Amino acid sequence: MGPYRRGSYHTKPVKMLYRDPDTGREWSSRGHPPAWIEGKDRSFFLIDDERRSPG
């Protein structure tokens, strides 16, 4: 076994799912929710994406 190397893994880019209409900040829904979305209806903040629409 080799030595443990912290942070030696690679991650894929994450698509942003939510946007704050006031500041333009985005959140991917990973980790703790930011203050601007916490406790609110998240459907209001969804980023419109033609790939997610049915049809």
Image (cartoon, rainbow, N blue to C red):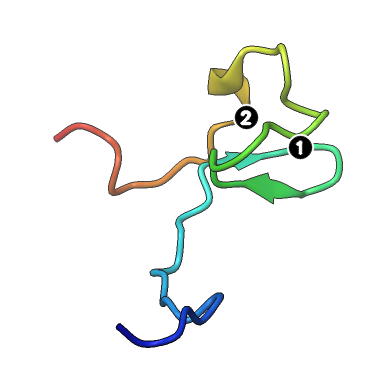
Among the 4 quarters of the image, the one containing residue 45:
top right
Among the 4 quarters of the image, the one containing residue 52:
top left
Local crowd at mark 2 within 10 Å, few (<14), some, or many (≥20)?
A: some
- Furthest-left residue in view? 55
Q: Is residue 50 above or below residue 37?
A: below
Front-most of residues 13 and 54: 13
Q: Secondary structure at mark 2?
A: helix
Local crowd at mark 1 within 10 Å, few (<14), some, or many (≥20)?
A: few
Q: Secondary structure at mark 1?
A: loop
Amino acid at circle 2: Phe
Front-most of residues 30 and 40: 30
Q: Earlier in the sequence, mark 2 or mark 1?
A: 1
Residue 38: % across, % down = 73, 21
Residue 47: % across, % down = 53, 41
Residue 21 circle label: 1
Residue 14: % across, % down = 46, 59
Q: Quadrant of the N terminus?
A: bottom left
Whether pointer 2 and pointer 1 mark residues with C-beta atoms closer than 8 Å, the reply is yes
> What is the distance, in whole Å, between disc 2 and disc 1 at their CAs?
7 Å
Which residue is at a point 28% across and 36% down the rendered structure image?
53
Which residue is at a point 72% across and 25% down the rendered structure image?
37
- Furthest-front residue in view? 1
Q: Which residue is mark 2?
A: 45
